[in-house]
C-alpha cells in the first residue's frame, strides 16, 4: 500500500514537471508549423523565396550603384546618417556620372575626328596615285620611271629610323627642322652634351646641329654602308616601314624660301645664288660686294623677280636640279615611286602632327615641338607677285604644277588671272 502511494505521488509530480516544461517552451513549440514537417516541398519553396529576396536585394544594390536616382543609404541606413549625408552622396554620384558622360563624349568626338582624318589621308594618297598614273593629264620628269632608276644622290632626303621602322622625306621650308628633331630623338642619333645620353626632348636639339647631314641615316648613304645590297635593302624598308612627308602650297613655299635665304644676309646663299641672280638679271655693271653683309649694308640684294627669272632660266636647269629649298617636292621625295603612308600639310601642321605620332605609335615617347610658325601665308601671294609679269607667273606655275596637282593645292587664280 505504501509502495502504491509512493508511485502515484511520483506520477503526479512527474506530470506537474511536464506541464511546467510545456508552459516554459510553448513559444518555441507553437512557432513550429506542423505542415512544414508534413510537406517535403516546403524546404525548396522556402529556399526559393529566400533566394528570391536575396536576389532582389542584390539587384537593388547593384541598381543603386549604377542609377544615381536610387541612394544606397535608403536601402542600408548607415549609423549616424541623415538627410545631409544622403544629398552629399547623391551629389558625389552625380558628379561621377557626369564625368563618365564627359569622358564618353570626348572619346566619341576623338573617334569622329580620327575618322575624318583617315578619310582625308585616303583622299591625299588617292590623288597622288591618280596623278602619277597619268589620269590627271599632268606630265613631269620621272613620273613613270622605276625606283631603281633614281640616282643615289636624289635619295638624300629619305631619312631612315630602323629602331621604329620609320622613313621620313624632309622638304625644306615645311617644318623640316622640327621633324628632323623628332627623328633625332626617335633614332637616338645625337648625344646631349649636358646629360651624355641621347636627346629625349626634340625642343632641346639645337637647330644648327639637326641640319648636319652626318647625324641622319638616308638612302643616299646606303651604298657606302651596304654596297651592292643597298637597293635591295631600300626596297625592303620601303615595303615594311611607315613612310611620311609634309608638303606646302608650292608658291608660298617659294616665297618663304626667298625671304629666308635672300631677305637677310646669308653668306653661302649670297655667294652661290644671290650674286649670280643680280649679275644675270639685275643689269649690274659694277662689281658686287664680296660678302652678303657688305651688300646688304649698301642696299644691294636680289629681288623676288630676279629669283623667279633664275628659276625659269633654262641655264639654271642645266646647271643643277635646283637647290633643295626650291626644288620641287616630286623631285625631293619621289611620290610616284615611294608609296607614302601619311601625307601631312603645313597648313594643318598641329592636327596632322598629332595624328601622325599616334599613327606611328610613338606619341607616348615623343612630342612635336611647339614654336613660332612661319608667317608666310597664301594671302601674301598677290602682293609678292604684283611686280612679276604675267608670262613669268604662268611659266612658274607650269614649273611647279606637278606639286600643285600631286598634293591637291588649288591653282592660284589670284596670281594667274589678274
Image: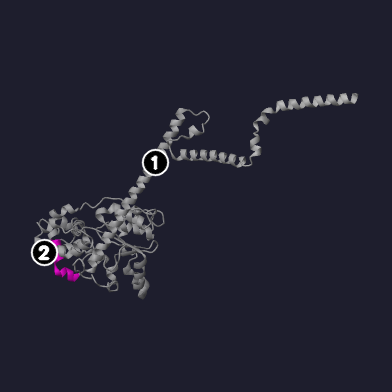
Q: Which residue is mark 2?
A: 281
- In which quadrant of the rendered image does the C terminus lie? bottom left
Determine which of the numbered discs, if any, sits on residue 10 in the image.
Answer: none
Magenta span dominant secondary structure = helix
Mark-to-mark CA distance, 2 and 1: 67 Å
Label 1 Cα crowd, 10 Å radius (few <14 / some 14-19 / many 20+) = few
Q: Is residue 308 magenta?
A: yes
Q: Nearer the viewer, residue 300 or 321?
A: 321
Question: Where residue 383 sits in the image (x, y, percent)?
Answer: 13, 53
Q: Is residue 103 magenta?
A: no
Residue at left 24%, top 68%? Answer: 133
Residue at left 66%, top 30%? Answer: 30
Say how many tags the image has. Answer: 2
Q: From this viewpoint, is residue 369 visible?
A: no
Q: Assign a secondary structure to mark 2.
A: helix
Question: Where residue 32 sits in the image (x, y, percent)?
Answer: 65, 33
Query: Vertically, is 211 above or below 50?
Result: below
Label 2 Cα crowd, 10 Å radius (few <14 / some 14-19 / many 20+) = some
Q: Assign a secondary structure to mark 1.
A: helix
In terms of sequence position, does the residue under pointer 2 or pointer 1 come before the other? 1
Q: Which residue is mark 1?
A: 99
Question: Where residue 55 sits in the image (x, y, percent)?
Answer: 52, 41
Range of magenta residues: 306-319
Q: Nearer the viewer, residue 399 or 284?
A: 399
Residue at left 16%, top 68%? Answer: 316
Amino acid at each position: 500500500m505504501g509502495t502504491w502511494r509512493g508511485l502515484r505521488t511520483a506520477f503526479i509530480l512527474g506530470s506537474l514537471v511536464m506541464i511546467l516544461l510545456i508552459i516554459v517552451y510553448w513559444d518555441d513549440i507553437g512557432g513550429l508549423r506542423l505542415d512544414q514537417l508534413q510537406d517535403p516541398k516546403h524546404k525548396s519553396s522556402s529556399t526559393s523565396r529566400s533566394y528570391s529576396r536575396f536576389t532582389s536585394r542584390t539587384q537593388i544594390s547593384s541598381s543603386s550603384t549604377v542609377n544615381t536616382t536610387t541612394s544606397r543609404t535608403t536601402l542600408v541606413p548607415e549609423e549616424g546618417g541623415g538627410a545631409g549625408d544622403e544629398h552629399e552622396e547623391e551629389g558625389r554620384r552625380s558628379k561621377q556620372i557626369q564625368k563618365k558622360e564627359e569622358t564618353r563624349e570626348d572619346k566619341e568626338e576623338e573617334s569622329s575626328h580620327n575618322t575624318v582624318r583617315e578619310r582625308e589621308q585616303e583622299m591625299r594618297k588617292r590623288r597622288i596615285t591618280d596623278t602619277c598614273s597619268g589620269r590627271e593629264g599632268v606630265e613631269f620628269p620621272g613620273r613613270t620611271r622605276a625606283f631603281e632608276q633614281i640616282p643615289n644622290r636624289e635619295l638624300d632626303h629619305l631619312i631612315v629610323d630602323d629602331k621604329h621602322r620609320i622613313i621620313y622625306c624632309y622638304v625644306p621650308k615645311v617644318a623640316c627642322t622640327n621633324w628632323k628633331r623628332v627623328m633625332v630623338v626617335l633614332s637616338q642619333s645625337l648625344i646631349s652634351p649636358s646629360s651624355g645620353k641621347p636627346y629625349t626632348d626634340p625642343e632641346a636639339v639645337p637647330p644648327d646641329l639637326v641640319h648636319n647631314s652626318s647625324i641622319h641615316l638616308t638612302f643616299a648613304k646606303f651604298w657606302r654602308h651596304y654596297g651592292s645590297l643597298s637597293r635591295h635593302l631600300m626596297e625592303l624598308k620601303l615595303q615594311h616601314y611607315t613612310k611620311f612627308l609634309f608638303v606646302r602650297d608650292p608658291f608660298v613655299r617659294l616665297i618663304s624660301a626667298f625671304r629666308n635665304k635672300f631677305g637677310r644676309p646669308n653668306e653661302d646663299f649670297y655667294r652661290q645664288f644671290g650674286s649670280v641672280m643680280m649679275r644675270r638679271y639685275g643689269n649690274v655693271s659694277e662689281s658686287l660686294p664680296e660678302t652678303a653683309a657688305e651688300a646688304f649694308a649698301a642696299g644691294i640684294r636680289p629681288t623676288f623677280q630676279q629669283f623667279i627669272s633664275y628659276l625659269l632660266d633654262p641655264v639654271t636647269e642645266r646647271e643643277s636640279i635646283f637647290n633643295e629649298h626650291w626644288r620641287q617636292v616630286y623631285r625631293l621625295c619621289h611620290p610616284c615611286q615611294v608609296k607614302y603612308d601619311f601625307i601631312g600639310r603645313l597648313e594643318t601642321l598641329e592636327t596632322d602632327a598629332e595624328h601622325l605620332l599616334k599613327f606611328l605609335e610613338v606619341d607616348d615617347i615623343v612630342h612635336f615641338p611647339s614654336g613660332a610658325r612661319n608667317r608666310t601665308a597664301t594671302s601674301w601671294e598677290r602682293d609678292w607677285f604684283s611686280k612679276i609679269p604675267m608670262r613669268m607667273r604662268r611659266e612658274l606655275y607650269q614649273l611647279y604644277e606637278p606639286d600643285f596637282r600631286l598634293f591637291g593645292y588649288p591653282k592660284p587664280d589670284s596670281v594667274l588671272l589678274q
